[in-house]
Image: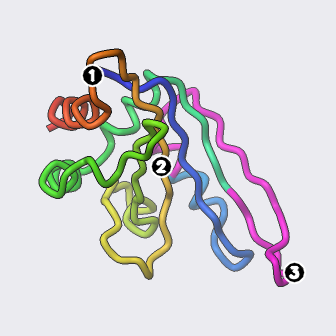
Amino acid sequence: MSVHRGEWRVHASAVDDIRVIEDSLAWLCGDGVSISTQKEKSTLGAPMYTISSSMTGKQSMFSLGRLERVSIEEILLSGVESRIDEHKFLHLRIDLAALSRGKGELSLNNDTMVAKGRFKLEVYPGQSACEVARSIFEGLV
């Protein structure tokens, strides 16, 4: 059971250390994944950045493997169903402060900055997306 593709995205303001965020995403994604940074203006005109990465299926599995064991267990305990949308995308939110320290920890607090992950699950006829996601995380534990 696997993933077709994945992406991580971080929205940051001009006062955030963009280089640290880029390095953190590079660690999370592994070698060979390019990190792109786009400078934009917020709706109020303030400068902001979108830092993102796109990964192949294999790179996505490597990236999911960077999650802390406690976070994987939390995903399994709380149920993967709430993290999967109708298009069979798995959604994760990683704490950005922990990520900058080299730890892939789930964000349990809505007030912290996060890296948002989106992974297209490889689901075939007769399988459910939840079953596939559960199998992926059980394989990572």
Instruction: Tell me if residue 104 is in the magenta stretch.
Output: no
- What kind of residue is marked 3? Gly
Between 13 and 120, the one nearer to me in the picture: 120
Looking at the rendered image, the quarter that the C terminus falls into is top left
Q: Secondary structure at mark 1?
A: loop
Picture disc at residue 127 = 1
Residue neighbourhood size for the residue with mark 3, other residues' Cα within 10 Å, grouped as few (<14), some (14–19), many (≥20): few
Q: Earlier in the sequence, mark 3 or mark 1?
A: 3
Give the labeled residue for mark 2: 117
Looking at the rendered image, the quarter that the N terminus falls into is top left
Measure the alpha-carbon separation of dots 3 and 1.
Answer: 46 Å
Is there a contact, CB below 8 Å, between mark 2 and mark 3?
no
Measure the alpha-carbon separation of dots 2 and 1.
Answer: 22 Å
Tell me where residue 122 sits by quadrant: top left
Between 22 and 113, the one nearer to me in the picture: 113
- What kind of residue is marked 2? Gly
Between 25 and 42, the one nearer to me in the picture: 42
- Residue at 40% x, 59% y is 94
Magenta span of residues: 25-50
Q: Earlier in the sequence, mark 2 or mark 1?
A: 2
Indicate the position of residue 132 as horizontal and vertical percent values: 27, 29
Give the labeled residue for mark 3: 45
Measure the alpha-carbon separation of dots 2 and 3.
Answer: 26 Å
Q: Secondary structure at mark 2?
A: strand
Q: Of circles 2 and 1, which is in front?
A: 1
Is the residue 58 above or below the residue 24 in the image? above
Q: Earlier in the sequence, mark 2 or mark 3?
A: 3
Tell me where residue 110 sits by quadrant: bottom left
- Residue at 79% x, 55% y is 38
Is the residue 33 above or below the residue 114 in the image? above
Indicate the position of residue 123 as horizontal and vertical percent values: 37, 22
